[in-house]
Amino acid sequence: MLDLRRVTLLREVHRHGTLHAVARALSYSPSSISQQLRLLEQEVGVPLLERSGRRVHLTPAGLLLVEGAGAVLTDLERLESALAATEQTVSGTVRLAVFQSAALGIVPRALSLLAERYPQLRVEITQREPESALDEVWAREFDLVIAEEYPAHGAPRRRELDRVPLGQDALRLGVASGSGIRSLADAADRAWVMEPRGTASRHWAEQVCRVAGFEPDVRFETADLQAHITLVEAGHAVALLPDLVWGGRDPRVSLLALPGEPHRSLFTAARSSTADRPAIVAVRSVLALSIEPAARAGYPERATADKEHP
Amino acid sequence: MLDLRRVTLLREVHRHGTLHAVARALSYSPSSISQQLRLLEQEVGVPLLERSGRRVHLTPAGLLLVEGAGAVLTDLERLESALAATEQTVSGTVRLAVFQSAALGIVPRALSLLAERYPQLRVEITQREPESALDEVWAREFDLVIAEEYPAHGAPRRRELDRVPLGQDALRLGVASGSGIRSLADAADRAWVMEPRGTASRHWAEQVCRVAGFEPDVRFETADLQAHITLVEAGHAVALLPDLVWGGRDPRVSLLALPGEPHRSLFTAARSSTADRPAIVAVRSVLALSIEPAARAGYPERATADKEHP
DNA sequence: CGCGATTGTTCGGATAATCCGCACAGTCGT
DNA sequence: ACGACTGTGCGGATTATCCGAACAATCGCG
């Protein structure tokens, strides 16, 4: 009987391209990966990997196995969910991936509520960038993710993922108190701090500036929004900041409204095969209660329209 | 991720009723079974077994898991078959269960042909009674079985099993040479040797005698048809014997035709999910060539009518 | 009613599977 | 041509798995 653990390894090889990357992603040594794949090949009796240069790629048979295994794993996971649903107490483990500002603005409250309402439930939280986190949920490295979507930057929608809107997070221009800046145009020639190139956040931020008629002078790049705050506080830069970074505390910089009052949409995503698990449902319900009241306020009118799972 | 090996154990518990029986069937110790099931329970977080007296039965959740796992295992096996079909050379292992007279009448020729035509193929042969063998194929303990069906005693047909007719095996009355018996009626007051009570063979044999107007005096009971021959040869008993027991050698007893010239139908059965595997197809084709020419002669006219897989 | 047989479970120790670190050969980019 | 990659074997350590024996509970049979 085909060992599903090994087949998962082949899946990851197809995803990452190299054995070293798989080893890194799953916290194994490259030699283990190599050995297990060799065992898988002799288990199936068909060559699955082919060396091309110093890399490897799947043979047609390997690709067939990966695709078929996806369906099997999904069915198995669905069965697990049905099994968990027979119990009335919510228990088990949920591996949750969150980005930094959600970790500060949502998670603390959520943890208190979870401990109170579902003491049997174990929640493991890891900080991860939204872009990679969605892939990792798909690859079963996490069960649930809090992700974001910037205006006009729809995140890729995989059919296997169940997406539920969580709220709207207002985006504002953050400037040092007493800097004299009163509008976006005033910040045109200031130094900016933005997230690294390639992120949806960065792309959106640059677009905002260009629409306002200037190219931002990006002098600082970091994914750490707390660093953004520090730089803005000290007057070294201005930044576009979502409300969530304040985590309920009073902001110590001046926040100015942007034209059109833009928001980033927050949502959670889980694999469709696990979306019915009581543990997932419970965490999601608690997360919805834990979001900033201001953000939640903007939520109901979009709730039904955005809902994805059919 | 749910370990399918452990789920299989639960399947077997549902099938056999007790952990000891599972241990016996799979050649494990009872303590291993108990430990693995305990691990499975804490893996899913739901109680699957319930002690009732000194036995144990599945909880509703356990039953749900077993049923769902059946579908998953079938899909996985189908995937394995598709994978094996990508190779042109027939290889791998086929576990074949045969009953005794098939082992003598078919298997030797089949092994020669297999070694010649499919040297890469490994075939493991186990002697087993047809009644249990069909169950064991279903439970994945064997991949293919040669089974029999006596007139008016249709073997239970599972939907998951793919059944292919193999041939007809004539049944005759065997008596000692020079015993003076010329018909079934002459054997009415002789001592009989028959297979054990509960087998289809036995039930059919008794019916034949009753239709002929007498109740057989069954003085010897054994499933070993070679022992039947020995007893008939020595003149201690008469018996109803299929032609296949002679394995191509000349019979050393007198064989008399029975009224209606009855036959037992031989067929092979494999799980539907593995019926497409090249290895299974190859073994079946060789088996069809290896059956006694006399038996194969009666085959073609029933071939298409009996074919099951749609 | 009592005794033996059977069943499931637990505990220590043996066995086998798995994983790691290291060294090596081949390949790619600079 | 060199260094930084890639994948892959080998020996040893770690871990999971399995077994045998002992135990309590239950059932069947005399």
Image: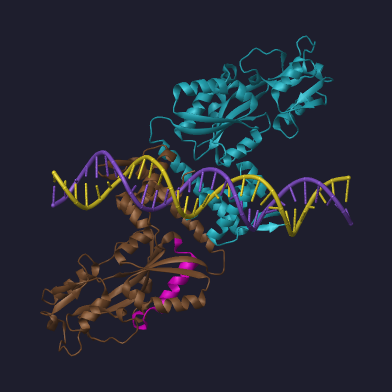
Chain colours: A brown, B cyan, C purple, D yellow
The quarter of the displayed image where residue B257 is located: top right
Residue C10 to residue B226: above or below = below
**Between A196 and A209, which is closer to the camera in this rendering?**
A196
**Between B255 and A25, which is closer to the camera in this rendering?**
A25
**Between A299 and B236, which is closer to the camera in this rendering?**
B236
**In the visual, does B295 lie left or right of C30?**
right
Q: Which residues are magenta?
A: A274-295
Q: Residue at x 79, y 13 (%)?
A: B181
Residue B167 to residue A289: above or below = above
The quarter of the displayed image where residue B169 is located: top right
**Rendered location of residue B234, percent (x, y):** 77, 15
Q: Magenta stretch containing residue B173, yes or no?
A: no
Residue B54 to residue A182: above or below = above
Please tell me whether the stretch drawn in magenta is mainly helix, strand or loop. Answer: helix
**Rendered location of residue B292, percent (x, y):** 58, 18
**In the visual, does A91 lie left or right of C5?**
left
**Rendered location of residue A219, percent (x, y):** 14, 74
The quarter of the displayed image where residue B213 is located: top right
